């Protein structure tokens, strides 16, 4: 059995009931086979892959908080500090009832390579809780965030671990967490990113993941002789990533005809009205049915179905495993040209294989959505300098990072004989830098 397969088996054996983590490890390690084969003896001796798949540290803690009726609730908090070979741990905090250790580990593992691909000095980590922010009052959200940070503050720091937002953790939650950290530690430092502008946040961070997704997709298409202007795009999700992906796509001259949330999806033949979508999701925090109520040409469908829409470009921006084999078949049958993952691991293994085998240009999440964490790292730089950069400065850096990232993964794929396979290219390019740093730092 190959070294890679031995380590995959070990991960499955030692981490039972963590299917998402198994999926992420398998996907990355299998694509690293050509690099591992070149260095197998040294990697085995130094247990490099075993060290890569075992987090440096994982913390699990109780988060008690009191609701508006005086009832106490107990949620579980997590922070997985996966790999600090190239910089302080960096990765978001997810607040969603589906959160468990396996989900946080899959996200943290992916984050190692994504952060490496940005070219910036940030290691990989992830955290969160099974707390559901939906339907909670502001005071309840604050109570949860303060309790969560009371424990988390013992494990993070501006030079140690710098968490950020993710599903369910937006500007409001980051604000409450930052306030509590400052109060507990008596330090005003860049310990969290995604902060509000008056207290150390970066311009363009809110837009960064969605905008970055479009910058890299535009570069991919440009290098294949395709102009993004005039193309029809299907987007899933209606959160932070989806909204700003839609906004930038429209600025680049494309037409986005769908969006979705966890209850249903919208088809708008006139192109999604971003201002209305922002108002519904960011201000009113309402369901997408409100969109169809206000736009007579738009149709609301219950349940899933975005991928049945005919589109040139598909951008899944909601959650993991939201694109299955049947969806992939529909996309191929409908003549889709490019597929770029805005969400983390939105595509199942079978669907990814099917899309790639059928010639769809496929950009994996760790490359396609790296704009968010890249801009978080730019927020850290501004905090260290105690300066603010303009929106245009940050946006220009983001664009440069995404264009360079595309060429790095393209070059890595070509170097190992996998031209056009950006999944392999991204894993190899992300891994090489981390591997070099781990080897140089000895057995730690
Ligand atoms: P948000 O919470 O802002 O939005 C998530 C969207 O996806 C919402 O529309 C939500 O619907 C929908 N959704 C969530 N869970 C499910 C589910 N189980 N089934 C169907 N729909 C679901 O999160 P973000 O936009 O920040 O994140 C989206 C994805 O992008 C995640 O995978 C995240 O890890 C990834 N990502 C985010 C980055 C960022 O900077 N924000 C950076 C890199 C990756 P509803 O409104 O009904 O809950």
Image: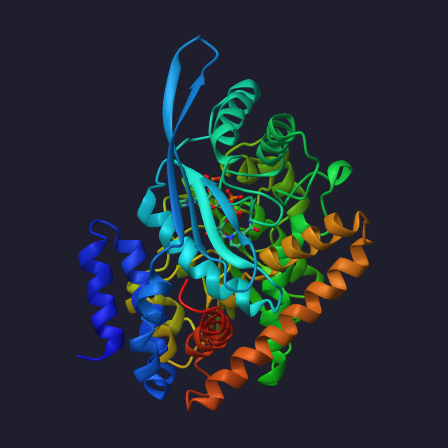
Residue 134 picture location, percent across and down: 46, 29
Is residue 90 depicted above or below 440 in this figure? Answer: above
The quarter of the image holding the N terminus is bottom left
Is residue 364 depicted above or below 134 in this figure? Answer: below
Residue 47 picture location, percent across and down: 31, 70
The quarter of the picture where residue 192 lies is: top right
The quarter of the image holding the C terminus is bottom left
Tell me the residue at 35%/56% (across/down): 321
Q: For this rendering, which residue is in front, 409 or 11?
A: 11
The quarter of the picture where residue 347 lies is: bottom left
Residue 206 picture location, percent across and down: 66, 48
Q: Is residue 329 visible?
A: no
Is residue 261 depicted above or below 419 in this figure? Answer: above
Q: For this rendering, which residue is in front, 109 or 353?
A: 109
The structure's colour scheme is rainbow
Looking at this rendering, what residue extends furthest in the front direction?
Answer: 442
In the image: residue 142, left or right of residue 442: right
How many numbered badges does the structure rendering display? 0
Tell me the residue at 49%/23% (across/down): 136
Residue 30 picture location, percent across and down: 31, 75
Q: For this rendering, which residue is in front, 196 or 88?
A: 88
Tell me the residue at 51%/28% (across/down): 150
Q: Is residue 399 visible?
A: yes
Q: For this rendering, which residue is in front, 439 or 145?
A: 439
Tell me the residue at 55%/56% (across/down): 257
């Amino acid at each position: 059995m190959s070294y890679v397969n031995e380590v995959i088996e070990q991960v499955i054996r030692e981490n039972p009931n963590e299917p998402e983590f198994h999926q992420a490890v398998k996907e990355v390690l299998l694509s690293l086979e050509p690099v591992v084969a070149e260095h197998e003896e040294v990697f085995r001796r130094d247990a490099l892959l075993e060290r890569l798949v075992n987090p440096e540290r994982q913390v699990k803690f109780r988060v008690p908080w009191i609701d508006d009726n005086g009832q106490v609730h107990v949620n579980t908090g997590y922070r997985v500090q996966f790999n600090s070979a190239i910089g302080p741990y960096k990765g978001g905090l997810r607040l969603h009832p589906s959160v468990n250790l396996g989900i946080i580990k899959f996200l943290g593992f992916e984050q190692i390579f994504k952060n490496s691909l940005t070219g910036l000095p940030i290691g990989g980590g992830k955290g969160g809780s099974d707390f559901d922010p939906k339907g909670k009052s502001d005071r309840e959200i604050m109570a949860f965030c303060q309790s969560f940070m009371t424990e988390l503050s013992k494990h993070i720091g501006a030079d140690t671990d710098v968490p950020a937002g993710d599903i369910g953790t937006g500007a409001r939650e980051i604000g409450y967490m930052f306030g509590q950290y400052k109060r507990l530690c008596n330090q005003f430092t860049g310990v969290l990113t995604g902060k509000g502008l008056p207290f150390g946040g970066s311009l363009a961070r809110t837009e960064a993941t969605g905008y970055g997704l479009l910058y890299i997709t535009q570069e991919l298409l440009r290098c294949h002789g395709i102009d993004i202007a005039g193309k029809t795009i299907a987007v899933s999700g209606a959160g932070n990533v989806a909204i700003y992906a839609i906004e930038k796509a429209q600025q680049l001259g494309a037409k986005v005809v769908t969006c979705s949330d966890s209850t249903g999806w919208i088809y708008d033949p006139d192109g999604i009205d971003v201002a209305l979508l922002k108002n519904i999701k960011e201000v009113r925090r309402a369901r997408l049915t409100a969109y169809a109520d206000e736009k007579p040409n738009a149709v609301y469908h219950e349940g899933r179905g975005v991928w049945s829409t005919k589109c040139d470009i598909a951008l899944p921006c909601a959650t993991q495993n939201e694109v299955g084999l049947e969806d992939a078949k529909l996309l191929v049958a409908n003549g889709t040209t490019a597929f770029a993952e805005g969400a983390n691991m939105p595509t199942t293994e079978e669907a990814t294989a099917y899309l790639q085998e059928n010639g769809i240009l496929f950009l994996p999440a760790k490359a396609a959505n790296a704009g968010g964490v890249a801009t978080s790292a730019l927020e850290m730089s501004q905090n260290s300098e105690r300066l603010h950069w303009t929106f245009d400065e940050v946006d220009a850096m983001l664009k440069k990072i995404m264009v360079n990232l595309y060429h790095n993964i393209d070059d890595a794929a070509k170097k190992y004989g996998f031209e056009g396979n950006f999944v392999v290219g991204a894993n190899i390019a992300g891994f090489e830098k981390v591997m070099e740093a781990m080897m140089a730092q000895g057995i730690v």
